[in-house]
Amino acid sequence: MRKPIIAGNWKMNMTPAEAERLVAELIPLLKDAACEVVICPPYVDLALVGKLLVGTNIKLGAQNVHWAPKGAFTGEISADMLLAIGVSHAIVGHSERRQYFGETDETVNKRAKAALDANITPIICVGETLEQRESGVTDTIVSKQTIAALAGFSAEEVVRSVIAYEPIWAIGTGRTATNEDANTTIKVIRDAIAGVYGQKVADEVRIQYGGSMNAKNATELMAMPEIDGGLIGGASLKSEDFSKVVHF
Ligand code: 13P
């Protein structure tokens, strides 16, 4: 019922020339994908990549979005600007932004709402630190982050959103959550959504796993009933690896 969605988060990688080469490799490799496929290059590559993706099945995502339509917000990009160059998805609240750039539950909520208002799908990231996991507060943390990110949304807006569960200790470390742990925590997130919006809405929301997901472990992770997709960092930078994840 929930269509799987695999998204590549290129983070701060790929010059325009490098992006062009990678996209040229990805287009034929991914053309028969059964799932929804999104790539999220850095801002400087977006317009170029958007042009290259016209007429393909690969969707274009940004790595962030500001909540205001325009104005004095140096370094930020608005949803309308993204929409104008063909962006359909935007990552919001990635843990790297929360950790290094002062992103809060409140700004995540505002960014996600602005994306939805522009008909851009927010990919809202939540996840616990290693310390939080070891002290047994994972469920509380991810539930709180999720409900805060969705604050004020209608049921329809919740269904249009994608949640990405990314345990911080699994990001870029090669240490993936076990299939069971990822599935269990995603179920916790779904239950939290059900608690506020009802089971029907919760059953429709797609929730990805992210954190060292790659060509080797994607099949097993995607076989778990609660996991509806992946948010892929390192393995999205190599066409063959990303293709294997997409064809899980
Ligand atoms: P890695 O796949 O490199 O662990 O990164 C995951 C991630 O943060 C995707 O947003």
Image (tube, rainbow, N blue to C red):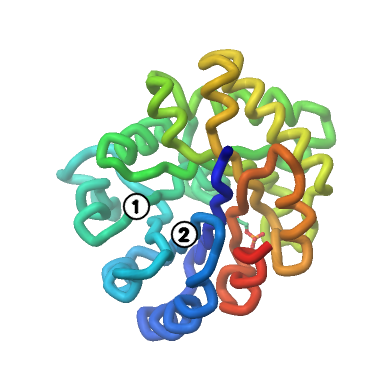
- Measured as percent of width and height from the top left, residue 135 is found at 83, 30
Kindly check if marks 2 and 1 are in contact, taking CB atoms under 8 A apart as contact.
Answer: yes
Question: Which residue is the site of mark 2?
Answer: 38
Please name the residue shown 16% across and 44% down the image. 70
Disc with the residue nearer the chain's start (2 vs 1): 2
Disc 1 residue lies near ligand 1 with CB under 8 A: no
Q: Is residue 141 above or below residue 179?
A: above
Residue neighbourhood size for the residue with mark 1, other residues' Cα within 10 Å, grouped as few (<14), some (14–19), many (≥20): many
Q: Is residue 68 something one can see in this rendering?
A: yes
Q: Is residue 102 visible?
A: no
Which of the pair 175/6 is nearer the observer?
A: 6
In the rendered image, the quadrant that contains the N terminus is top right
Secondary structure at badge 1 equals loop
Position above or below: 181 against 5: above
Q: Please, what is the three-letter code of the amino acid marked with disc 2?
A: Val
Image spot of residue 190 (x, y percent):
63, 27
Residue 238 percent location from the top left of the image: 59, 77
Amino acid under disc 1: Ser
Farthest residue in the left direction?
A: 71
Secondary structure, mark 2, is strand
- Residue drawn at the location 21% of the way across and 48% of the way down: 80
Residue in the picture at 31% in, 56% down: 87
**Which quarter of the picture shows residue 188?**
top right
Reading the image, the residue beneath label 1 is 88
- x, y percent for residue 203: 59, 28
What is the C-alpha distance between the residues marked 2 and 1? 9 Å
